Amino acid sequence: MSEIRKICVVTGSRADYGHLSPVMRAIAEAPELKLQIVVCGQHLDVKFGNTWEALPADGFDIDEKVDIGLTKDTSLATAEATGRAVAGLAQAFENLKPSIVLVLGDRFEIFAAGAAATLLRIPLAHIHGGEMTEAAMDDALRQSLTKMAVLHFVAAEPYAARVRQMGEKPDHVFVTGAPGLDYLNTKTFITRGDLAKDLNIDLTKKFFVATYHPVTLEHDYGAAAMEQLTLALETFQDASVIFTGVNSDPGYAEIQKILLRFCSSQPSKRKLVQSLGQYRYLSAVKEADVVVGNSSSGLIEAPALFTPTVNIGDRQKGRIRSPSVIDSDEDAAEITSAIHRALDPDFLKSVTSQTPAYGHSGNAATQIATVLKTVKLERLSIKQFHDIIPAP
């Protein structure tokens, strides 16, 4: 009998955990695989809700915790924390000795995990590669992870083509869809009435789910755009707004301050929840009239739930779009106009009949686990550049 493979999954925040948890479940349920979990980054910070607690609540055992010591929201502090993350994650991998390290996305602590695995000569598998976010430093980190990884699980064919274009071996690039959408086939969602009771907010009229993260390549990290978003939302006095927490990228403190001021002015109709968790978040998106902000969930999860999205600014520029996504500049009048369009009955009819750009088969996690247990490990030891057009 072949040796059981140890698959070490690294998660740094509620955002990647929501997409990783179906994959983690599929790995845990595969007799040929042993799941290892390393938690780091935003998960361990009380300011962001101690979101690591969601893992044991979901039945997962955490093998290692790596505190990267991010105490400020500056670019220098992020760079320093990335260095600590490389060191801490390398020690965690040395302790666990995984067969493969599995990561998702594009955040700096995930980049650190990729660097640590590469330097320790542990094969790296990467989920959600090939995507573009032109206004964020995440873009460079994501493409760097692609070049460090030897296995690629991508959400759509255009992203697979981009990964192959970067010189990755075609037979190591797998179009699985977005694993976070696997939930849509397995969950009975929370009703609007129960959400209102759970969050202590009035949802009897229209309501929006909003998320706004720092735009790391803008000089003010998106603070001025956040002001414009709140001005736009002020025009919808009858609507309630559920804001999800800001991530830990540089500039988060100022955006959080603007957000808290906005929510405190009408606490019965405006609520900031640092982490809804994937189940409550998807339920809220499903029940919402519009999703507003600059999060990737407006392009991935919301269209799959047939909820219109108003996507603000350039943070998601480069990602493929479903017909339900309305792009808006970072201007209060334009955001207001875009929300009115999203609420238009004729637009809503087109949304409910759309084919979402990402789609979802409901078995992305199973596909990923199957590759992890069947791929020949010896084929992953030396990485080669695959030329689409042979060099002269």
Image: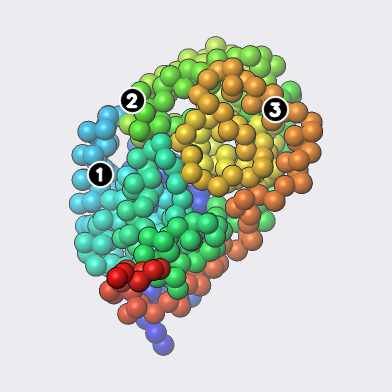
Residue located at (45% from left, 78% from top): 374
**Extreme-top residue of the structure:** 265
Tell me if residue 36 comes above or below residue 134 in the rendering: below
Residue 82 badge: 1
Quadrant position of the C terminus in the picture:
bottom left
The amino acid marked with disc number 3 is Arg
Q: What residue sits right under mark 3 in the picture? A: 341
Picture quadrant where residue 216 is located: top left
Q: Earlier in the sequence, mark 1 or mark 2?
A: 1
Residue located at (34% from left, 55% from top): 145
Report the front residue among 323 and 391.
391
The amino acid marked with disc number 2 is His
Q: Are the residues at dot 1 and dot 2 in contact (C-beta closer than 8 Å)?
A: no
Residue located at (51% from left, 45% from top): 319
Residue 219 badge: 2
Tell me if residue 58 comes above or below residue 390 in the rendering: above
The picture places residue 353, in percent across and down from the top left corner, at 77, 46
Residue 267 seen by the camera: no
User: Within 10 angstroms of label 1, few (less than 14), some, or many (20 or more) residues?
Assistant: many
